[in-house]
Image: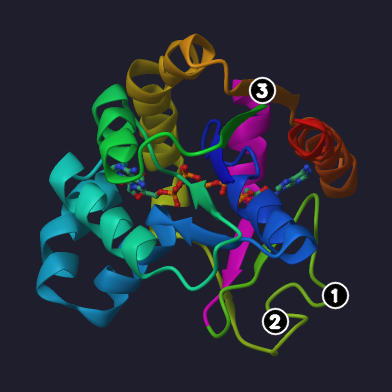
Amino acid sequence: MRIILLGPPGSGKGTQGELIEKAYGIERFSTGDLLREAVDKGTDLGRRIQKPMERGELVSDDIVIELIQEKINKKDSQAGYILDGFPRNIQQARELEKIDPGKDEIALDIRISDHEVIERLSGRRVCSGCGAVFNLKKNHPEHQDACDKCGGTLIQREDDRPEVKKKRLEVYHARSENLTGYYKSKSTYREVDGSGGIKKVFARIAAVLNQHLSKKEVI
Ligand code: AP5
């Protein structure tokens, strides 16, 4: 099964993607994480994408398509995969279909309001050691500046700065939101209410996934 996580910045794609990965044993590929890793390592690719990412713009389709193609081709398990942050526009969605055609698919669109996006991104802190994600307002660490898991320093993502998060939200509404129509036309689209706590949202997602899996068993 291919699970595609759609939704605005901060809607919980990464948070829920990790929970799905653990609960269902399905590998997760996050284009955001792969791109940030390239920037942090200072690779050629990292230097090319750093500026657009810092401005809150999308990086070029060719780059993310190549990254995802490589991951899908090299994946370890037959259980399927979760895509977090990809596709981001219709062109990427069409390319995905060429890379892995006819795959059993479910596109989960995690919906929250623009107000909630800004709230969540303002409070997000990421561990510079292990990458764990916290929220100072909603999913807070025990100590304000240290990671509960490894004790590493918590930092704010560059693109969570006020002017950049506004830009990312604009880009989402202009470029990514129309993916709903694409997946509705394929009948793989499922909308999920992303409001409320992390466990509550996961329970909604699990209900959708379990229903999908039980239908497959019957067929
Ligand atoms: P990416 O990293 O994918 O950013 P994004 O889509 O903007 O999503 P975020 O990572 O900001 O949020 P999320 O939905 O994962 O939420 P999270 O779980 O962290 O991409 C970054 C950049 O890379 C892009 O801007 C672009 O430049 C580039 N890029 C990536 N993919 C690309 C592509 N395909 N094409 C072109 N360019 C691409 O949660 C957010 C916060 O809220 C956390 O603090 C969390 O603890 C908290 N939280 C989560 N759920 C809840 C809840 N239910 N209640 C309360 N708090 C919650």
Name the residue tied to disc 2. 146
Q: What residue type is labelled 2?
A: Ala
Q: What percent of the width, then of the height, locates residue 149?
A: 74, 84
* Above or below, 79 relative to 42: above
* Left or right, 146 with reference to 153: right
- Which of 116 and 111 lies nearest the eye of the viewer? 111
Marks 2/1: CA–CA distance = 8 Å
Would you call the spot at circle 1 few (<14 residues within 10 Å), some (14-19), or many (20 or more)? Answer: few
Name the residue tied to disc 1. 142
Element on which disc 1 rests: loop
Total marks in image: 3
* Left or right, 67 with reference to 158: left
Would you call the spot at circle 3 few (<14 residues within 10 Å), some (14-19), or many (20 or more)? Answer: some
Would you call the spot at circle 2 few (<14 residues within 10 Å), some (14-19), or many (20 or more)? Answer: some
* Left or right, 37 with reference to 26: left
Element on which disc 2 rests: loop
Marks 3/2: CA–CA distance = 36 Å
Q: What percent of the width, then of the height, locates residue 201?
A: 82, 39
| Residue farthest along the front direction in this orientation | 219
Task: Magenta stretch: give its range.
Answer: 112-128
Name the residue tied to disc 3. 190
**Can residue 135 be seen in the rendering of this structure?**
no
* Above or below, 35 relative to 168: below
Element on which disc 3 rests: strand
Q: What residue type is labelled 3?
A: Arg
- Which of 100 and 8 lies nearest the eye of the viewer? 100
- Which of 109 and 38 lies nearest the eye of the viewer? 109
